[in-house]
Each structure stands twice: as structure tokens, then as C-alpha cells.
């Protein structure tokens, strides 16, 4: 007897309604979801159909086990912000770092490159800090003990300039400047720290390192002492990049190049007063002038030579428009004829080496003569092939001067103006303005100016003041990086670099740096621990003086350099060991260390265990550090960080300064891996600038713009933006990128909500089904989940969170929403609650929920913890980040399982393609396969020749499946027949078999069941056999 409408049905439905939702509630009022039987409907999209009261479908509504969860589909605005803050508090974000650091586990150390403490947090900070945090959280989840101590770079000119601006006075004492600068840096640190915490960055924010801390400064001086004791630090008078706007020397890393710099370029003549002997007979009669080209006319008064390329060809040419004879490189003659606007007739040609012995007359200094000299830096790319050489204003020029013992005369002061030595006509004139014009005028007056024109070219600027720099000599302290270069290159070859393309840039930067100027003429920094004799000016610096100063800095901070009397800074015992005279004979040096040396020594302050020799107590090596930092971060013998992660600007900055200092002291790099990311730019690819009004404020991204122009996205959207971006190129941010991130997170929430709703009332600790007892498609999904988790783990290991997101989206869309969810909804909603099939599915859904949630946790920690709080199977106080990484088992991969399900899917694809736009559930299928492996695999999914409830029927999503070795001959006229093949590959290719199959699809004659909506009922409005049994057994 069919179970149809009537008294018995009503009683059964009443009983079901009372017991259908047993198992308890979640945290809040439950949410009722709707179901769909339509193929291709993804999770959360649901096909809600209105049901009239009293209809057959309405009678069975409460008997269907629909998803239930109080996890919201969407959070926005203040609710989203409040929820994120609530999760941070409830899930112990603030204590997570301390908790994991107390575990005994293999260590992972990501050494934090200190951001500059000179302003508010910006999207560059967000990109860098979140990228680091994603990897740290991944390493922690998979069981590592993460060591990550955030730091700040606190010294330097930008902070000093802001301090001076706030003080608004001149002639300030160094201590006045330093106290204001420290105050400014502390304020910036607190603002940045608060932002980093709000972004969810995991750290012990009470234990950070600061380069202005006395203990850090002491460690830095230890590094300085080690390098100095090896003879690698020296004082010299040589050209350096000098910023007139900052009045200090600069390192290469402190420069930025302005491609739109406008210079006056000139061609000028140096008359030959002594013709080179080897060309005298070839040059003919007449006066010859050497033609030079320069973009810096102001350097002409400092000229000491004209250089040529020994192996190049040179010519004496005669101008057609006048009798002037000019000497230039032969290959530049055609270009020069165009520049001068006249034909050039060759008089004689010879090699550069034959120019030896030539002497020129200086054009603006009548009594001065300058030689022709060979040099390897001469090129033929521009100019005349003869290079005006001013050793005071060029690095290559200085090398020539060193080789040939030329004088290095500097006629430019620290303000970028000509000194008195330049003569009354030039004295006090700026070399960038009127001084440059005056030199050109002087060349014109003496008849040496041949051509003058404007030239737009790339020129170095002070990256802080955005003003042009000059090269001028001054007495500075240097590190001889030339002698470290080969060791540094060897060390770099052992370092993993991501992306690998950045390695060549690192090597190129090392090649370009023959020495490193480490002294700065400022107040806010670590003093160079040197004393000068009052009479002789001789420097006093050795291991005794430096060690003593380091001990004072550790105790009192570096302000004591200005606070303490000289006899405290140079006590009698130190002077005795140094074999020096009384302290009163000396004065303290006024220079401070380059901030790249500050931060470049961070490995010693934060990573290095041992700078003071062997000791029985390891912590005694760190006695100069504050107690919280004495715990060694790296116990391996090499004491290297596992990774440094910074922007590409650090290729010539922190990456290099850290490498050079570490190689100088320890003969090894301080890092095992380097990760180099791009810059944050706006959506047009433009650099962000306050003046252009295109700056994206990360605080506005999270909390919304004050004017309402930007919605409140929350921290997870900011983190998704970082993760999704191709970090190895420029990273674009703007409304489109942020809206896309928000929408993608909402899609993810929807999928997670579907999973949560369907594991409601399921306890995996007591109700889970073992993999061997599961239905094939459920086992297959565990196999796919295992593959997904392995790929995600590999991607995180490669610092490729973008690949993680792509894997996640493919898994959710292709494997879950479109495939698995659409197939198993009937089993989930309509099978008995405690049936093996339903529990099998729920076991898999719970594994998927757990795996997906853990896989997104490093990127979206707030969402992951929120989902975990709604997930069954763990205690209320347990949090995701304290419970480990994705759990998957090797038993999830069963031989033949993949081929069975994928073979069935291939058959299903052929079937669905034959009925485009139609409902697969309305068809009966006959699948014909010749005896063989494929037929055996399909038999494992359906034992009986015909079935409406087999695993094969579920996979086909059809009404009925008949499994045969051949199609019947008497098929109805409306039958749709399709054919295909499937290649079976077992045991790594040992077993290979290609099988053919045919499918006959016929519209089913069965009616739709009013409860499960499958076409398996015998008459309208009556239940199918499966639903009859379910309701009959209902309590």
C-alpha cells in the first residue's frame, strides 16, 4: 500500500516534525536553508519553491533534513568590524604568539625588516606585514615554533628633520634634537603597532626591537668592532654622494633617480699644448683641441685630466664651417657632425693608446695643464669618447686620480655652493643654479664652449628631501665592500631567492658597490665610537674603546655620548690598553652611523646567540640584551633566519647591508631565503602620492572612509587583497580590487555556511564513518581533499598565497558546488538522519569544512575562527589556531577509486551533453559497456542490473540506471543515444585499458515524489519507495 495523504500520513508527519531537528541548537537562533534538486545549482543558491498550504509537498516539508546554522551569510559595516574585534579577543589573538612559542617544536624564524618610524601606517606596511603574517600563521599551524620579533628603524634624517620642524629653532644642541626625534619615533611606532595588531598580525607586541634601544645599539657596536678589527672599516677622503639639502653623505640605497631631471649639457674644448708624440706626425698642421661632453658644467673648474679608451679608434677632424681641428672618437664622428650641424673631415686616425703623453690646457684656468690618460670607464654610448675627469666629483674619476696620483680638489661646500678656492667669480654660487650658468658663461668667454643644450636624463636625488645630490669628497668612514664582494656573492649563491629573477639584481648591486660610506653628519643616530686628538686630528678607535662605549650604550643609551664627560667615555684603563695619552687630549667624533648599518646589524641584535665567545650558559652571550630578548631565537649552529621578506627596494638596502655585515663578521649570509615583493600602487599602476591624492589608507579600507566614500571592508578583505595579488610584481589596490576581494570572501562564506548547515547535529567524534565504509563518491571527495591540501601546503611553503586562493576557488567551484554538493543533496536532505549514506556524506562534509577552514586560516584568520566556533566536534574554548593544520590521511587514496568515480563522471558528462538545458532527473538511462575493467568498475557502483537508488544512479543524477553489456535493439523513438571512451590507468600506468561505452537516455515514466522531488514515484502525489520507508520508520 502506497503511503499517500490520509490520517496515517498526518500522524507520521506530526511525529517527524517534533523530532526532525533534535541534536541541540548552535550559539544563536537557527537558520533554515532551502534545497534544490536542479543539476549545477551551487551551494547557497538554493531553489526555493513556494508550497501552498495543504498541498502534498507542503505536507512533507518538515520531514526533509534541510541545512541549519546561525552562521550569517553576510556581514558588513559595523557588524563586521565588531565581529572581527570580538574574534580577536575571544580567540586570544594577542596571546597566540606566546602560546606557540612555548611549544617544543622545530623552529621557523622570519626576521622582521624594521619599518621606518616616521609616519602613519600605509598600504606598503599592510602588504609587507600581512604577507609575513600569512606565512608565520601557516608555519605555526603546521606545528613549527615561529620566531618573529617585530622591529622599528628609529634613527635617520626624516625623523630628525621632522623633529627640527617641530622645534622650529636653529643652533640646537644634539641632545635637544635627539630627545624630540625619539619622542616623534615613539609616537609613530605606537600608531603603526596598533594598526598591525588590528590587521591580525601575530606577534608578542610587548617584546619588539627598536634601533634606538641601548641594548640594540650595543649589539650594533659589537658588529662595528668586529668589522673594524678585520681592517675593513677605514677613514678616507674620497667622493661620496652628498645631499646639500640634508647636509650629509648618503649611501646608494638612500638615493632615488629622477628620470625627468633637466641639466645643461655642453661640448667644450681643451686645447692640446703637447701633442701626443705618437700622433704628432699624423695630426698635420694647426692647433688641435680635445672635445669633451658633460651634463655637469659646474665640475669643469675641478678638472684634472681628460680620459680616453686605449683600445678605441680616435680621429682628428676638421670642421667644414671653420678651420678648427677637433680630437674625438672615430665612431662618434657621425653623431657629432649632426650635433654641431657641420660636416667633419677626417685628418688622421689612430688608436687610443697613441694618445699617451698628450697634455691639454684647462679652458677656465689659463695656468693649469691637464694630461690625457687611459681609463676603462670611458664608453662610446654618448658624448665624444673623451671624458672630462674631475676626481672630486666622480667615483670613476677618483679611481683614475688614485691610479695616476692626481690631486683631488673640492671646490664645493656642504651646501652645494662653490668655495672661495673656486675664485671670486664663482664663490658662494650654487652649483645647480647660478654657479652652473656662470661656468658656462666663462667657457663661452674664453672660446671653449662649442655647443650648449638642455638634457633631460636620470639623476640621483635624496630620497628624503627629493632634492638633487652632488658627488663631492669629504672625510668619511667607509667599509671596504670591494674585499667582501666575492665572499658575499658566494654566500648569496647558497640562499634561496623568490622570485629567482631577483638574484641577478642582488648580484648587480653588489658589483656596483666598491665601498660603503657609513658615516653621516647628523645628530639622530648611533655615534661612531671614535675620538680625535685635538692637535693632530688622529683617530683613536680600537677594540678597547669600542667595547667600553658599547657597555655604556647598553646601560645608558647612546645619548651618553653627549652627556658624559670625556674621562668617563675614555677612562684611564681604556687609555692604558690603547697606549694613548690623557683623555683631555681627545674630543668625541660628531658623525653617526648610516641607518642601513643600524638595521643591517639587526641579525646580531635579534638572531645571533654568540658575539662574546664561548660560555657554559648560552644566555650569557646575550647578556647585553634586555631579558625578554635573551632567549636565543635560533638554536641551529648557523644562526640564520629562515627568511627575510621585504620589498624590492631592499635589494640595495636592508638585504645588502645585512648580507655585508654578516659576511664580514661570520662569513655567511644571515638568511636562508629571501622573498622580494613589489610595491603597492593604485589601480592605474601609478605610485601613490599625497600630492596626487591617490593614496589608499589601510585604516580607511578596514573602517571605512570618514566621508563615506569607502565602505568598511574589515581586516580580512585587506588580507585577501595581499594574498590574492601577484606579490612579485607591482601590487594594485583600489575600489575594484577591494570589491573583488569582498565578493570572493562572501562567496567563500556562502560555501562554508552550506557546509555548516549540513553538519548540524553531527558529532564527528561519535558518528563519523570510516573511509572504507563510505560510498564511493564520498571516498573520492576525501581523495580530492587530500590532493587539495597537499597543493595548498606546497603553495604556502613557496610564499605563494595567490596560488592558495586559486586552488581554493577551483576546489569550491569545480569540486564542491558544481559537482559534489549537487549530487549529494538528495541523500543529505531525504535519507534517514542516522543512515550510513547520510552519515558517510556528513563525515566527508565535516572533513571538507575542516580542511577548507584551515587552508584559509593564514589568510583570513577572523573568518576561519568564526567558522570554527560554529563547527561541531570540539570544545567551546578550543580555537582553530591552537589545533593544527589540515588533517588528511594516506588511506583516502584507494586504488581503483579514482578511476571508478571519474569513469562514471565521464559517462555522466556524455549523458548531460546529450540533453542540454534539460533536467537529468527526468531520464532513465541504459549504460552499455563491453565486459572489461570499466564494466567492473561500474558494477562496483551498482550491483544490480537496474536501480533507482544505487551509487551510479546518484552520480548520474538520473531517475533510473540500467547497466548492460550492450544496448537493447528495441529502443523507443525518443531515445537519445550517445557514445564515448574512457582510458583506465592503474598502478602508475602498468594497467592501461581504453573502454568504449554507449548511453541511451529515455524520458522516465515515473512520477515526481512530493517529498524528495525525484522521479521515482509510482503515481502523482504519492511517495517513492525510499521516502515511504523513511517516514514509516520515523519516531
Image (cartoon, helix red, strand yellow):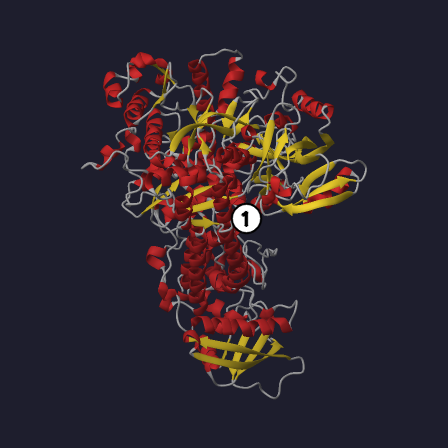
The quarter of the displayed image where residue 464 is located: top right
Drawn side of residue 451 relative to residue 813, left or right: right
Q: Is residue 257 in view from this perspective?
A: yes
- Pick the front one: 803 or 1016: 803
Callout 1: few (<14), some (14-19), or many (20+) C-alpha neighbours within 10 Å? some
The quarter of the displayed image where residue 471 is located: top right
Q: Residue at position x 37%, y 20% from top?
A: 538
- Pick the front one: 770 or 313: 313
Dot 1: element: loop
The quarter of the displayed image where residue 15 is located: bottom left
Drawn side of residue 977 relative to residue 176, left or right: right
Q: Residue at position x 23%, y 33% from top?
A: 620
Q: Is residue 392 above or below residue 636?
A: above
Q: Is residue 666 above or below residue 788?
A: above
> Which quarter of the figure is the C terminus placed in?
bottom left
Image coordinates of residue 843 in percent, x first then y, are: 40, 60
Where is mark 1, residue-wise? 726
Q: How many numbered marks are there?
A: 1
Image coordinates of residue 306 in percent, x first then y, are: 60, 35
Q: Is residue 915 above or below residue 699?
A: below
- Pick the front one: 925 or 62: 925
Image coordinates of residue 176 in percent, x first then y, are: 44, 13
Amino acid at each position: 500500500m502506497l503511503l499517500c495523504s490520509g490520517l496515517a500520513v498526518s500522524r507520521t508527519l506530526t511525529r517527524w516534525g517534533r523530532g526532525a531537528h533534535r541534536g541541540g541548537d548552535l550559539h544563536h537562533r537557527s537558520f533554515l536553508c532551502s534545497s534544490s534538486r536542479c543539476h549545477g545549482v551551487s551551494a547557497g543558491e538554493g531553489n526555493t519553491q513556494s508550497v501552498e498550504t495543504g498541498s502534498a509537498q507542503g505536507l512533507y516539508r518538515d520531514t526533509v533534513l534541510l541545512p541549519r546554522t546561525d552562521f550569517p551569510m553576510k556581514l558588513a559595516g559595523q557588524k563586521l568590524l565588531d565581529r572581527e574585534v570580538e574574534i580577536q579577543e575571544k580567540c586570544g589573538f594577542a596571546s597566540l604568539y606566546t602560546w606557540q612559542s612555548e611549544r617544543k617544536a622545530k623552529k621557523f624564524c622570519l626576521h622582521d625588516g624594521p619599518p621606518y618610524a616616521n609616519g602613519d601606517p600605509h598600504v606598503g606596511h599592510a602588504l609587507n606585514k600581512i604577507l609575513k603574517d600569512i606565512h608565520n600563521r601557516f608555519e605555526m599551524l603546521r606545528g613549527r615554533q615561529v620566531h618573529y620579533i617585530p622591529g622599528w628603524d628609529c634613527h635617520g634624517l626624516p625623523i630628525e628633520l621632522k623633529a627640527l620642524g617641530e622645534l622650529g629653532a636653529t643652533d640646537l644642541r644634539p641632545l635637544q634634537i635627539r630627545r624630540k626625534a625619539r619622542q616623534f619615533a615613539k609616537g609613530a611606532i605606537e600608531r603603526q603597532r596598533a594598526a598591525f595588531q588590528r590587521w591580525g598580525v601575530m606577534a608578542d607586541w610587548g617584546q619588539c626591537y627598536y634601533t634606538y634601544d641601548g641594548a640594540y645599539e650595543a649589539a650594533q657596536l659589537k658588529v662595528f668592532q668586529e668589522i673594524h678589527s678585520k681592517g675593513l672599516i677605514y677613514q678616507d677622503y674620497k667622493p661620496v654622494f652628498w645631499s646639500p639639502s640634508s647636509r650629509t653623505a648618503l649611501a646608494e640605497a638612500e638615493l632615488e633617480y629622477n628620470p625627468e631631471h633637466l641639466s645643461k649639457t655642453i661640448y667644450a674644448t681643451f686645447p692640446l699644448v703637447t701633442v701626443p708624440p705618437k700622433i704628432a706626425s699624423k695630426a698635420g698642421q694647426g692647433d688641435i683641441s680635445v672635445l669633451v661632453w658633460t651634463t655637469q658644467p659646474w665640475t669643469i673648474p675641478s678638472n684634472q685630466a681628460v680620459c680616453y679608451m686605449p683600445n678605441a679608434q680616435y680621429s682628428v677632424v676638421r670642421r667644414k664651417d671653420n678651420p678648427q681641428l677637433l680630437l674625438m672618437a672615430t665612431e662618434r664622428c657621425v653623431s657629432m657632425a649632426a650635433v654641431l650641424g657641420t660636416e667633419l673631415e677626417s685628418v688622421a686616425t689612430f688608436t687610443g693608446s697613441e694618445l699617451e703623453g698628450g697634455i691639454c690646457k684647462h679652458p677656465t684656468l689659463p695656468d693649469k695643464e691637464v694630461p690625457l690618460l687611459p681609463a676603462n670607464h670611458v664608453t662610446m654610448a654618448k658624448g665624444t669618447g673623451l671624458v672630462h675627469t674631475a676626481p672630486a666629483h666622480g667615483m670613476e674619476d677618483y679611481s683614475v686620480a688614485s691610479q695616476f696620483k692626481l690631486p683631488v680638489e673640492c671646490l664645493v661646500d656642504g651646501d652645494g655652493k662653490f668655495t672661495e678656492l673656486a675664485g671670486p667669480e664663482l664663490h658662494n654660487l650654487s652649483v645647480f643654479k647660478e654657479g652652473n650658468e656662470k661656468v658656462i658663461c666663462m667657457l663661452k668667454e674664453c672660446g671653449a664652449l662649442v655647443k650648449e643644450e638642455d638634457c633631460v636624463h636620470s639623476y640621483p636625488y635624496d630620497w628624503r628631501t627629493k632634492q638633487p645630490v652632488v658627488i663631492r669628497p669629504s672625510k668619511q668612514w667607509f667599509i671596504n665592500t670591494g674585499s667582501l664582494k666575492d665572499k658575499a656573492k658566494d654566500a648569496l649563491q647558497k640562499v634561496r631567492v623568490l622570485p629567482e629573477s631577483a638574484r641577478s639584481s642582488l648580484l648587480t648591486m653588489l658589483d656596483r658597490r666598491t665601498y660603503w660610506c657609513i658615516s653621516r653628519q647628523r645628530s639622530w643616530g648611533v655615534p661612531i665610537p671614535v675620538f680625535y686628538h685635538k692637535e693632530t686630528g688622529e683617530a683613536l678607535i680600537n677594540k678597547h674603546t669600542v667595547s667600553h662605549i658599547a657597555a655604556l650604550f647598553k646601560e645608558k643609551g647612546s645619548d651618553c655620548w653627549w652627556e658624559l664627560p670625556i674621562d668617563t667615555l675614555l677612562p684611564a684603563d681604556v687609555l692604558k690598553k690603547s697606549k694613548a695619552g690623557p683623555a683631555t687630549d681627545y674630543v668625541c667624533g660628531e658623525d653617526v652611523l648610516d641607518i642601513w648599518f643600524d638595521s643591517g646589524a639587526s641579525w646580531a641584535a635579534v638572531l645571533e646567540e654568540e658575539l662574546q665567545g664561548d660560555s657554559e650558559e648560552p644566555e650569557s652571550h646575550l647578556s647585553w640584551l634586555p631579558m625578554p630578548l635573551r632567549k636565543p631565537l635560533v638554536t641551529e649552529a648557523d644562526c640564520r633566519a629562515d627568511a627575510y621578506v621585504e620589498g624590492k627596494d631592499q635589494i640595495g638596502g636592508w638585504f645588502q647591508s645585512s648580507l655585508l655585515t654578516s659576511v664580514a663578521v661570520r662569513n655567511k649570509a644571515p638568511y636562508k631565503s629571501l622573498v622580494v615583493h613589489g610595491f603597492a600602487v593604485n589601480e592605474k599602476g601609478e605610485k601613490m602620492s599625497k600630492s596626487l591624492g591617490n593614496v589608499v589608507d589601510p585604516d580607511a579600507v578596514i573602517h571605512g572612509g570618514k566621508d563615506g566614500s569607502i565602505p568598511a571592508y574589515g581586516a580580512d578583505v585587506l588580507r585577501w587583497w595581499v594574498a590574492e595579488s601577484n606579490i612579485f610584481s607591482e601590487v594594485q589596490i583600489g575600489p575594484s580590487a577591494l570589491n573583488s576581494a569582498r565578493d570572493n570572501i562572501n562567496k567563500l562564506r556562502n560555501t562554508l555556511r552550506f557546509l555548516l548547515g549540513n553538519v548540524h547535529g553531527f558529532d564527528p567524534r561519535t558518528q563519523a564513518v570510516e573511509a572504507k565504509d563510505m560510498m564511493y563518491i564520498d571516498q573520492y571527495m576525501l581523495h580530492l581533499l587530500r590532493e587539495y591540501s597537499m597543493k595548498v601546503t606546497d603553495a604556502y611553503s613557496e610564499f605563494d598565497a595567490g596560488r592558495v586562493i586559486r586552488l581554493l576557488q577551483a576546489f569550491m567551484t569545480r569540486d564542491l558546488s558544481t559537482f559534489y554538493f549537487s549530487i549529494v543533496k538528495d541523500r543529505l536532505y531525504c535519507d534517514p538522519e542516522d543512515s550510513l549514506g547520510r552519515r558517510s556524506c556528513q563525515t566527508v562534509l565535516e572533513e571538507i569544512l575542516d580542511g577548507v577552514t584551515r587552508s584559509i586560516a593564514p589568510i583570513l584568520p577572523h573568518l576561519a575562527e568564526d567558522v570554527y566556533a560554529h563547527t561541531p566536534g570540539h570544545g567551546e574554548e578550543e580555537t582553530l589556531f591552537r589545533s593544527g593544520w589540515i588533517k588528511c590521511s594516506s588511506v583516502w587514496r584507494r586504488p581503483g577509486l579514482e578511476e571508478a568515480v571519474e569513469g562514471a563522471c565521464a559517462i555522466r558528462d556524455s549523458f548531460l551533453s546529450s540533453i542540454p538545458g534539460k533536467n537529468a532527473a527526468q531520464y532513465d538511462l541504459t549504460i552499455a559497456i563491453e565486459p572489461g575493467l570499466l564494466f567492473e568498475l561500474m558494477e562496483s557502483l551498482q550491483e544490480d542490473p537496474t536501480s533507482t537508488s544505487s551509487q551510479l544512479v546518484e552520480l548520474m543524477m538520473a531517475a533510473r540506471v540500467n547497466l548492460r553489456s550492450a544496448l537493447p535493439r528495441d529502443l523507443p523513438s525518443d531515445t537519445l543515444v550517445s557514445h564515448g571512451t574512457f582510458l583506465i590507468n592503474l598502478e602508475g600506468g602498468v594497467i592501461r585499458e581504453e573502454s568504449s561505452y554507449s548511453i541511451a537516455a529515455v524520458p522516465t515514466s515515473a512520477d515526481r515524489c512530493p517529498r524528495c522531488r525525484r522521479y521515482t514515484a509510482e503515481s502523482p502525489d504519492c511517495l517513492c519507495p525510499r521516502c515511504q520507508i523513511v517516514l514509516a520508520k520515523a519516531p
